[in-house]
């Protein structure tokens, strides 16, 4: 067994149900974790049954009654200690993320750093859960609004960010006084086991109530139990648009709350005024980072016709320099896709591009031979395509980049916005008018709009999320914390009279 697994307390066989510090004997399906880097089995996790789920929820309910009474700064102190524990485990956890998911080791470290950053953000937030005081129209009355803990937060995370998304949600939820139950992707269950182990030590040292941090490993059936459960007022789900629609429908039927972080089909507009020294690296990392499996990955390039040929030739040359292989090797730029099913979708997408008449500037393909035994390594591809094609309109979770031209700036904006997803967007320009139009209400319709940086990569502190079929929720920064709380307006009468609002008279 690899040393970093031992350091994280990950065994060959692991329980997949926890109430925080206690692992329950799981009775559900067994999930085997194979690394896409070498195809080797890393370990097993016993999935949660419906009975296991019930135990975790009941424990979460009882924990909430106690946890919400802790002063918010005290809850923040616990989160601060989690941040310190993550700093100590950054290297082994980063390696596990890289090994189990397939992203580069540098990206694995970056993901753990996101966890540390959200802890820092949440600690400060624990002293800033502010309401408002307002003037009343009634004499000798005072109005104010305040925020209270919501209850159980159900977190459904995806394989591409196996630890950061959980941290984005749980750290904010905890300082808000909520408790969490996490259903991680069954494709990366060992990352979840490792996170639970790290937090368990901190919770034990601080006598945090058992049930504040729950884990249920399972497939969509466990997710359905959670989304249909009235005891879980908020579901935060990250994944595909198809999955998000099902979650939204189920939670909506019971009038629950959702934070949905769904698909992206992100574009970069390259104007004739772009600084190519900045543009090219931003494009390449956005397109091939995490092997194109970020929801913020760059899918489309919309390029002014005057610089199109130059951009095209430079990108083809840059792609020729990419090194594909073991993500734990710092010399490699691109790791594998998550599994062979993802490889199949990648291959089918390329076939569809060819069928539509797309011109493949950089041919894709599945890599074979020594170092590629897992069958999950593919070549990043570039294709000239039309924005209206169905294959371009949908998100393919793989390193395929579509290039297209524009002449008028308004047309570039229209193409950028001309998809059903609305997560991330970017423009490369040194022209202030172009950048300001892009950022205005007549510009990008995405939740994230960047100037002179790529589409990929979220920074803690800014609210992360998108519009349209991306879901509309926000995580990780700004006032996203309000989604984890219930809002209450209060009016206090400190007079000896009872005046009514709007001047209404009601005399007895």
Image (cartoon, rainbow, N blue to C red):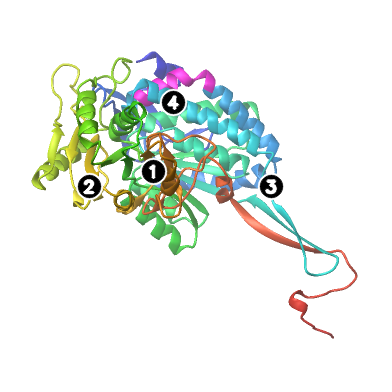
Residue at position x 19%, y 41% in the image: 345
Q: Quick one: label 1, few (<14), some, or many (20+) residues within 10 Å? A: many
Nearest to N terminus: mark 3 or mark 4: 4
Q: Which mark is residue 110?
A: 4
- Residue in front for this viewpoint, 396 or 85: 396
For the C terminus, the quadrant is bottom right
Query: Relative to 229, is 155 above or below?
Result: above
- Residue in front for this viewpoint, 497 or 338: 497
Left or right? Give the position of 232 relative to 300. right
Residue at position x 44%, y 52% in the image: 472
Residue ID for mark 1:
424
Stretch in magenta: 87-98
The Cα–Cα distance between marks 2 and 4, rounded to whole angstroms, is 29 Å
| Residue 91 magenta | yes
Q: Inspect this view and state whether residue 18 appears.
A: no
The Cα–Cα distance between marks 3 and 4, rounded to whole angstroms, is 31 Å
The Cα–Cα distance between marks 4 and 1, rounded to whole angstroms, is 19 Å
Nearest to N terminus: mark 4 or mark 1: 4
Q: Quadrant of residue 455?
A: top left
The answer to whether mark 4 and mark 1 are in CB contact below 8 A is: no
Residue ID for mark 2:
392
Q: At which x and y percent is residue 487?
A: 63, 56
Left or right? Give the position of 228 relative to 376. right
Q: At which x and y percent is residue 405?
A: 23, 44
User: Magenta span: helix, strand or loop, mainly?
Assistant: helix
Q: Nearer the viewer, mark 3 or mark 1?
A: 1
Residue ID for mark 3:
130
The Cα–Cα distance between marks 2 and 1, rounded to whole angstroms, is 16 Å
């Amino acid at each position: 067994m690899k040393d970093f697994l031992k350091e994280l307390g990950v065994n060959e066989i692991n329980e997949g149900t926890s109430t925080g510090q206690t692992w329950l004997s799981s009775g559900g399906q067994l999930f085997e974790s194979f690394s896409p880097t070498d195809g080797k089995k890393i370990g097993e996790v016993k999935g949660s049954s419906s009975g296991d789920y019930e135990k975790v929820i009941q424990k979460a309910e009882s924990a909430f009654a106690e946890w919400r009474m802790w002063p918010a700064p005290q809850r923040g102190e616990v989160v601060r200690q989690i941040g310190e524990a993550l700093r100590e485990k950054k290297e082994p956890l980063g390696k596990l993320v890289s090994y189990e998911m397939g992203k580069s080791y540098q990206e694995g470290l970056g993901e753990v750093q996101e966890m540390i950053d959200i802890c820092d953000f949440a600690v400060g937030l624990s002293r800033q859960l502010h309401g408002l005081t307002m003037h009343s129209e009634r004499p000798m009355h005072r109005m104010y609004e305040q925020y209270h803990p919501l209850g159980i937060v159900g977190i459904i995370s995806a394989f591409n960010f196996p630890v950061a998304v959980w941290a984005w949600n749980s750290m904010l939820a905890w300082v808000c006084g909520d408790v969490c139950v996490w259903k991680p992707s069954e494709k990366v269950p060992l990352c979840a086991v490792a996170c639970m182990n790290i937090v368990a030590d901190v919770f034990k040292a601080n006598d945090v109530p058992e049930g504040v941090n729950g884990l249920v490993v399972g497939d969509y059936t466990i997710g359905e139990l959670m989304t249909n459960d009235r005891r879980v007022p908020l579901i935060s789900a990250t994944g595909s648009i198809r999955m998000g629609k099902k979650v939204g429908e189920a939670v909506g039927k019971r009038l629950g709350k959702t934070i949905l972080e769904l698909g992206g089909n992100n574009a970069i507009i390259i104007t004739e005024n772009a600084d190519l020294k900045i543009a090219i690296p931003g494009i390449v990392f956005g397109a091939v980072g995490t092997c194109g499996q970020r929801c913020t990955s760059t899918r489309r390039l919309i390029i002014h016709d005057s610089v199109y040929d130059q951009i095209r030739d430079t990108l083809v040359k840059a792609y020729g320099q990419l090194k594909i292989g073991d993500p734990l090797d710092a010399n490699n730029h691109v790791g594998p896709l998550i599994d062979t099913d993802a490889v199949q979708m990648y291959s089918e997408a390329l076939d569809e591009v060819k069928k539509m008449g797309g011109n493949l500037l950089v041919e894709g393909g599945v890599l074979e031979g020594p170092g590629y035994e897992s069958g999950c390594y593919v070549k990043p591809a570039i294709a000239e395509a039309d924005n209206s094609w169905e294959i371009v309109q949908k998100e393919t979770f793989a390193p395929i980049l579509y290039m297209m031209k524009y002449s008028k700036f308004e047309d570039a904006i229209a193409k950028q916005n001309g998809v059903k997803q609305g997560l991330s967007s970017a423009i490369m320009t040194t022209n202030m008018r172009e950048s300001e139009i892009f950022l205005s209400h007549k510009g990008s319709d995405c939740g994230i709009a960047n100037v002179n940086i790529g589409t990929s990569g979220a920074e803690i502190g800014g609210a992360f999320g998108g519009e349209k079929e991306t879901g509309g929720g926000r995580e990780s920064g700004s006032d996203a914390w309000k989604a984890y709380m219930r809002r209450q307006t209060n009016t206090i009468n400190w007079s000896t009279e009872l005046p009514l609002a709007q001047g209404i008279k009601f005399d007895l």
